[in-house]
Image: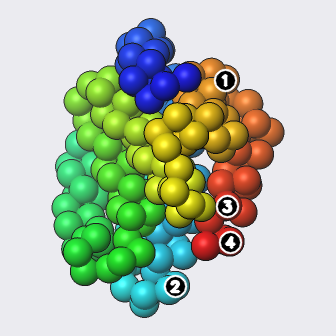
Amino acid sequence: MTYEAFINNFKSHIIALSYKERLSLAISVCEKLFVDYQDFYEENNWGDPGVLLEAIKLCRLSQTDNVEEIHLKEALVKFDRITPDTEDFSNASYALNACVAICGTLEFIMDKEAMHVFNVGVCLTDTIDVGVREEGDLTEEQIDEHPMMIEAREFLLGDYTNKNKVAGIFKRLKQLFRHK
């Protein structure tokens, strides 16, 4: 599936999901991308993984309880100081995607706009895109056909509640990036 076809399908898919399904998908992506921020923090001794973990906890809590908007806004403000800039760190892309995904999820909880969840999903495919590109000089077609990209897109378009499938995708993603 081409990038353009995926984007069109993913937008339609997100719109068709219920609020709870959208939130579940977004949280799942955030939890998995968190590891990239943790790795960035350990490599650069910069940032604060605790801010991401607290934000993810808020997101999880919002699945069952009503979280006051002030708490969500307070969490968002904290990201200003702990989100890495790719101009300051050559290895910030993955950590940046983790921060953007969590911020998008917090914003989704506040305004319930489906496009936030769409953007969270794009953070996942962007992360894979960067990792796959690091493997070598690949064409867009080769990236679209890469097993990790296919699997991530299928995950985003399919049964993201299947914990075994989710764990498998992110285990292979982690292995891919550990070899860099």
Give the residue displayed 53% in from the left and 50% down from the top: 138
Depth check, mark 2 against mark 4: the one in front is: 4
Q: In the rendered view, does 72 fall on the left or right side of 11?
A: left
Q: Amino acid at mark 3?
A: Leu
* Gap between marks 4 and 1 measured at Cα: 28 Å
Which residue is located at x 28 percent, y 58 percent? 75
Q: Residues within 10 Å of mark 3 (few under 14, many from 20)?
A: some
Q: Amino acid at mark 2?
A: Glu
Q: Amino acid at mark 4?
A: His
Q: CA distance from mark 4 to mark 3?
A: 6 Å
Compared across the picture, whether 31 is left or right of 120 comes to right
Dot 3 corresponds to which residue? Answer: 176
Q: Is residue 9 above or below residue 79?
A: above
Q: Which mark is residue 15?
A: none
Q: Is residue 141 visible?
A: yes
Marker disc for residue 159 = 1
SS class, disc 2: helix
Q: Disc 1 vs disc 3: Cβ atoms closer than 8 Å?
A: no
Q: Residues within 10 Å of mark 2 (few under 14, many from 20)?
A: few
> Which residue in the protein does label 4 denote?
179
> In the figure, 9 relative to 137: above or below?
above
**Screen quadrant of the C terminus:** bottom right
Of the two numbered discs 4 and 1 in the rendering, the one whose residue sits closer to the viewer: 4
Going from the N terminus, do you reach mark 2 or mark 1 first?
Answer: 2
Bin the neighbour count of mark 1 within 10 Å (Cα to Cα): few under 14, some 14-19, many 20 and up: few
Q: Nearer the viewer, residue 107 or 62?
A: 107
User: How far apart are labels 3 and 2 at the CA level?
Assistant: 18 Å
Of circles 1 and 3, the one toward us is: 3
Residue picked out by circle 2 = 42
Binning the other alpha carbons within 10 Å of mark 4 as few (below 14), some (14 to 19) or many (20 upward) gives few
Q: Are marks 2 and 4 in contact (CB under 8 Å)?
A: no
Q: Of helix, strand and loop, which one carries label 4?
A: loop
